[in-house]
C-alpha cells in the first residue's frame, strides 16, 4: 500500500554535478552494486557526522554569502 500523501518522511532535492564527478559517482555505484542516490546519501551523511563531531572544519565557499548583485558575475 502506498504511503498517504502528506505523510512524507524524507526530503527530496535536486542536485547538479560536473560531468566528471557524475561519471565517477556512476562508476563507484556500479562497482559497489548500489545506486548513485545511495552513494550521495552516504556521502552527505558522513559529512554531517564529521561536522557533528568536529572532525573536519568545512571551508565551503557558499554562494548565498555573496550579495545578490554578485550572482550574475559567477555565471
Image (cartoon, grey):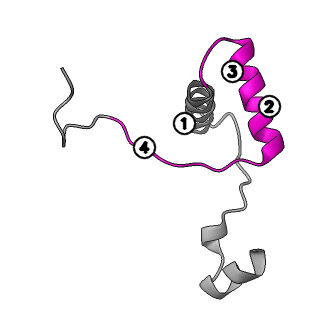
Measured Cα–Cα span from mark 3 to mark 4: 20 Å
Magenta stretch: includes residue 49 = no
Q: Upstream in the sequence, badge 2 or badge 1? A: 2
Residue at x 29%, y 34% (from the top left corner): 9
Q: Which of the marked residues, 3 or 4, is nearer the chain's N terminus?
A: 4
Give me the residue at 72% from left, 61% from top: 61
Q: Quadrant of the C terminus?
A: bottom right
Question: Which segment did they paint magenta?
Answer: 10-35
Q: Earlier in the sequence, mark 4 or mark 2?
A: 4
Q: Which residue is mark 4?
A: 12
Pointer 3: what residue? 29
| Numbered mark located on residue 4 in the image | none
Q: Nearer the viewer, mark 4 or mark 1?
A: 4
Rounded to the nearest whole Å, what is the CA distance between mark 2 and mark 1?
Answer: 27 Å
The residue lying at 56 percent from left, 25 percent from top is 38
Name the disc covering residue 52, or none. 1
Q: Which residue is the site of mark 2?
A: 24
Sequence-first disc among 3 and 1: 3
Q: 52 or 61, which lies in front? A: 61
- The residues bearing labels 3 and 2 have C-alpha atoms spaced at a distance of 9 Å
Amino acid at each position: 500500500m502506498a504511503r498517504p500523501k502528506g505523510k512524507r518522511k524524507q526530503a527530496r532535492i535536486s542536485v547538479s554535478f560536473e560531468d566528471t564527478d557524475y561519471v565517477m559517482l556512476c562508476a563507484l555505484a556500479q562497482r559497489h552494486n548500489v545506486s548513485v542516490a545511495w552513494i550521495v546519501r552516504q556521502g552527505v551523511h558522513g559529512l554531517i557526522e564529521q561536522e557533528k563531531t568536529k572532525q573536519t572544519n568545512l571551508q565551503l565557499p557558499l554562494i548565498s554569502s555573496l550579495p545578490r548583485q554578485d550572482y550574475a558575475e559567477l555565471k
